[in-house]
């Protein structure tokens, strides 16, 4: 197998860390750069393949929703938690959410007095955000964004940087769009987590071919700091992502049909078709395994995050280096939680 060139440092990576990951009858590998501490999906889907992956009905349904109504209540609560985390740094101002999905988070921010703008890469979803919530939502490569330089107090990328083919251009653009003292919040699945090491190709958050880059916490912090930011806070546990990452990975490793539990909480035609094919006996087994693995997953994710500092997700809060002293509450917030 031929090596790949690291898109972060241009060095050649000769051997894959993971291989034979299949999706829609295509095979993928992950090449990990030991210098950057970031992995890359190979082959990387081209633009037209990416458009197909994210088209309406595959990744999101028409109105942008992804999950069944029961799960929606939790999603709304998690978006409020995210708002509160940001408001520990900035009480109000202008915010840009990149990869905003259906715009629920920004809708909540708007309701709390924030001046909101959005980028969403899927054009129909972006149009839906503008129409549903009255939010300025644009699409496309960072070079095409029409926002004014130095115009935002906060920029968020929630599980987005791992999806984009041009992460470095994205970080440069974020730096130019932030005001002096601006805050950037980036969260990604952590490829160095214990759940990733355990699950390998069965790790739920590996999500190939949707994830093109596979960040570790160290790799993410390093690349953020190389782009003119100073990391002021790191979170390694997220109730929305971490325990479920363990749970679905454990089920995958136990030999259950890959990501079947996830299919039950998705609200899309293809996931409903998948569930229809599952026998009642199989569902009984899943329920049994769920009851067994759910508390274990919660304990494991707390252990990996707080004891081993290798959580399934890393969320980094960072500000522009030259204006570090301007931001609210920087006295004692350089910490890991
Ligand atoms: Zn590299």
Image: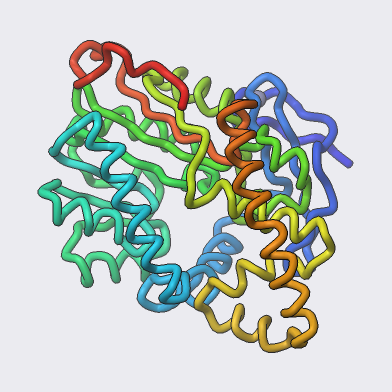
Quadrant in which residue 247 is drawn: bottom right
Q: Is residue 198 above or below residue 182?
A: below
Q: Residue at x 79, y 84 (%)?
A: 281
What's the residue at 60%, 49% (across, down)? 211
Q: Position of residue 20 (x, y in %)?
A: 84, 53
Evaluate whether residue 45 shows in this view: no
Depth check: give the residue in front, 242 or 271.
Answer: 242
Q: Using residue 39 as the reference point, say whether residue 228 is left or right of it.
A: left
Query: Which of 154/4 is in front?
Result: 154
Query: Height in image: 26 above or below 295?
Result: below
Q: In this view, does 281 lie to the left or right of 328?
A: right
- How many marks can you see? 0
**Rendered location of residue 298, percent (x, y):** 60, 48
Quarter of the image that includes the N terminus: top right
- Residue at position x 64%, y 34% from top? 304
Residue at the (27%, 11%) spot, across then down: 331
Give residue 89's quadrant in the image. Answer: top left
Answer with the quarter of the image where residue 34 lies. top right
Residue 29 in the image: above or below residue 9: below
Residue 121 coordinates in the image, percent (x, y): 41, 57
The front one of 259 and 14 is: 259
Q: In which quarter of the image is ligand 1?
A: top right
Q: How is the image coloured?
A: rainbow
Classify residue 202 as left or right of residue 80: right
Q: Where is residue 64 in the image (x, y as percent from the top left)?
A: 38, 70
Extreme residue toward the right, this view: 1
């Amino acid at each position: 197998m031929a090596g790949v060139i690291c898109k972060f440092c241009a060095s050649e990576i000769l051997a894959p860390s993971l291989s034979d990951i299949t999706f829609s009858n295509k095979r993928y590998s992950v090449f990990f750069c030991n210098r950057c501490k970031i992995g890359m999906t190979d082959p990387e889907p081209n633009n037209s393949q990416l458009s197909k992956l994210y088209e309406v009905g595959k990744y999101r349904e028409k109105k942008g929703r992804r999950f069944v109504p029961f799960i929606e209540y939790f999603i709304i609560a998690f978006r409020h938690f995210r708002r509160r985390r940001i408001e520990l740094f900035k009480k109000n101002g202008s915010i840009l959410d990149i990869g905003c999905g259906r715009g629920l988070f920004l809708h909540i921010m708007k309701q709390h007095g924030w001046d909101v703008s959005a980028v969403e890469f899927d054009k129909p979803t972006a149009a839906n955000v503008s129409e549903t919530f009255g939010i300025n939502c644009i699409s496309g490569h960072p070079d095409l964004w029409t926002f004014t330089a130095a115009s935002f107090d906060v920029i968020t990328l929630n599980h987005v940087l791992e999806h984009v083919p041009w992460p470095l251009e994205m970080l440069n653009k974020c730096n130019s769009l932030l005001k002096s003292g601006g805050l950037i919040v980036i969260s990604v699945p952590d490829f160095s987590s214990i759940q990733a090491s355990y699950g390998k190709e069965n790790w739920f958050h590996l999500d190939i071919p949707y994830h093109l880059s596979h960040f570790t916490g160290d790799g993410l912090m390093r690349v953020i700091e190389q782009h003119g930011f100073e990391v002021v806070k790191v979170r390694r546990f997220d109730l929305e992502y971490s325990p479920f990452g363990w749970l679905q990975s454990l089920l995958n490793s136990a030999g259950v049909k890959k990501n079947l539990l996830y299919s039950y909480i998705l609200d899309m035609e293809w996931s409903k078709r998948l569930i229809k094919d599952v026998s009642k006996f199989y569902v009984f087994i899943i329920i049994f395994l769920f009851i067994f693995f759910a508390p274990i997953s919660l304990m494991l994710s707390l252990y990996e995050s707080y004891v081993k500092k290798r959580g399934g997700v890393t969320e980094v809060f960072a500000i522009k280096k030259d204006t570090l002293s301007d931001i609210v509450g920087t006295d004692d917030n350089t910490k890991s939680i």
